Amino acid sequence: GAGVSQSPSNKVTEKGKDVELRCDPISGHTALYWYRQSLGQGLEFLIYFQGNSAPDKSGLPSDRFSAERTGGSVSTLTIQRTQQEDSAVYLCASSSGGGGAYEQYFGPGTRLTVT
Amino acid sequence: TQLLEQSPQFLSIQEGENLTVYCNSSSVFSSLQWYRQEPGEGPVLLVTVVTGGEVKKLKRLTFQFGDARKDSSLHITAAQPGDTGLYLCAGAPGANNLFFGTGTRLTVIP
């Protein structure tokens, strides 16, 4: 079956513009995560959706970042008024349950470059 | 913040050598996972450990979860060029989030 897909794969934007990143999780997976990864570094947790529960937004770095998940499936991460420090690879993952007992399946990521 | 520190940050070894990567925290985790990530791709799960003191073997890879469930190690025997990648540990303090470590970038030279 299809894995996690993300679009676009690459995005170059000017400082101050808004961007939307999309994640299509594996069908039936109730949990969805967004992470940010700077060059060669570990993953920084951004936000977590689990079923119909309120999302855990504790990792969002500023109020310029927001995310939604429609119909328990597709998710969109929005960054408003982008800054150069927002440049990174944004990874989405889904799993059949929440937390560390479940395998997270990752998409290939969206590489965001803010010029 | 559930900080997971990995060491070493970078490791370059010759094919056939053994190596150990460490993942340490001051926090207790209900479970811990190890992932490997190759360039341009997302991380892929290698193993999940859930019991303090647990040891799991996956071919040439041996994973250990500390007795206190605060740390873990990954040992690779007779490293191969195909083992090259970024190794990430990830700990779950509870039933929700998964916190990733700082990563160890391994290069195995043929």
Image (cartoon, coloured by chain):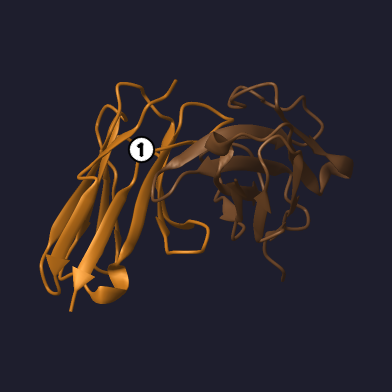
Chain colours: A brown, B orange
Where residue A69 appears, as percent x and y from the top left, is 81, 39
Where residue B93 appears, as percent x and y from the top left, is 46, 26
Residue drawn at x 71%, y 59% is A8
Q: Relative to the observer, which residue lies in front, A63 or A30?
A: A63
Q: Quadrant of residue B58?
A: bottom left
Does residue B40 sit above or below A106 in this rendering? Answer: below
Residue drawn at x 22%, y 74% is B80
Q: Relative to the observer, which residue lies in front, B25 or B52?
A: B25
- Quadrant position of the N terminus of chain A in the picture: bottom right
Where residue A102 appears, as percent x and y from the top left, is 56, 46
* Left or right relative to B46: residue A96: right
Q: Secondary structure at mark 1?
A: loop
* Residue beneath disc 1: B51
* Left or right relative to A31: residue B59: left
Q: Quadrant of residue B31?
A: top left
Residue drawn at x 61%, y 22% is A58
For disc 1, the chain is B
Single out the residue that lies furthest toward the bottom.
B110
Task: Work out whether residue A15 can be spotted.
Answer: yes
Residue drawn at x 59%, y 30% is B96
Q: Relative to the observer, which residue lies in front, B64 or B18?
A: B18
- Quadrant position of the C terminus of chain A in the picture: top right
Q: Relative to the observer, which residue lies in front, B91 or B9?
A: B9
Amino acid type indicated by mark 1: Thr
How crowded pointer 1 is (Cα within 10 Å; few <14, some 14-19, many 20+) is rated as some
Does residue A46 sit above or below A8 in this rendering? Answer: above
